[in-house]
Image (spheres, helix red, strand yellow):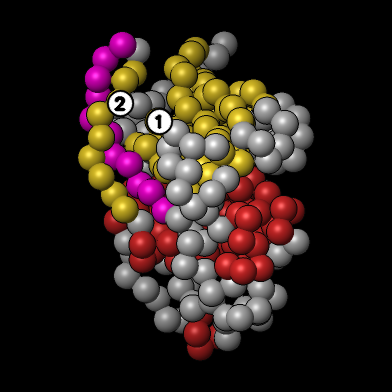
Amino acid sequence: MTIRFRAAAGVAMRVACALAALPVVAASGDEAAPPPTQSESKVEQPISQAERLLFMSNHMERVAPRRRLHYAFRRDGSLEPALTDTVDVDVLAADGATGRSVKVRFLSKGPGSASPSLPHVEGNPALLLYLEREIREMARLTGGRPEYFQRRIRNALAEHAQISEATVTLAGHRIAARRIEIAPYVDDPNRSRFEKFARRSYVFTLSDDVPGVLYSIETRLPATEDAGKAGAMLLDEKMDFRGEQRVD
């Protein structure tokens, strides 16, 4: 299975490959389970609509060179100190018929911050770097292996994603969007090993009317099972599109 995000190297490429090409394998009872065998790796699962929208669509083709996609990032909740930061994707030039060369500044400091330069990008790199950070954060918080959490997210997108139509606001105008929601760890057979974090869920909001397609990503971790959207949160994190600017 190939994807439309072709970086020569770097964390974004690793995430893209892990999420879009990793075979769906049932979780074992061991977080440190061995990788699938060669024969298992050859078994391809049907590509889900969620995977197509997130990883196999050209998000960047309508973004002109010398433009910057600007995102705000915030973290609230009782789990860790509050954080506000920014994410910028600078489109430097067209790269081939469909790609873009980009420079990304993903957060200015702290775990997960990165500043890769990437050739021939078609998928939005802010999305992939956000997921890379999430996977590393789950590994840090639980002591588990990043590969395990990659696989759980891959399973959720392939088999359990909920997709709905939505309407969001951009520059004062209401625009059509799609929301993709996953809760990768709710039914995890190893849930008891990281029960505190098992309610972690993700909401991806995409719109063709947004430059770079990505409108927002949200990570939510309620403090209790029945906390709901208005209840106490261990973690409430969001990266959302704030505008497009010219880069000289």
Disc 2 crowd, CA 10 A, few/some/many (<14, 14-19, 20+):
some
Residue at left 56%, top 85%? 38
Q: Position of residue 103 (x, y in %)?
A: 61, 31
According to the picture, the residue beneath numbered tag 1 turns out to be 215
Tell me which amino acid carries mark 1.
Tyr
Q: Quadrant of the C terminus?
A: top right
Q: CA distance from mark 2 to mark 1?
A: 9 Å
Range shown magenta = 172-182
Q: Position of residue 206 (x, y in %)?
A: 35, 37
Residue at left 52%, top 61%? 185
Asked whether the residues under the numbered discs 2 and 1 touch, taking CB atoms below 8 Å apart as contact, a structural biologist would say yes
In what element is the residue under mark 1?
strand
In-front residue for pair 165/70: 165
Q: Position of residue 97 (x, y in %)?
A: 38, 39
Horizontal side, residue 42 vs residue 112: left or right? left
According to the picture, the residue beneath numbered tag 2 turns out to be 168
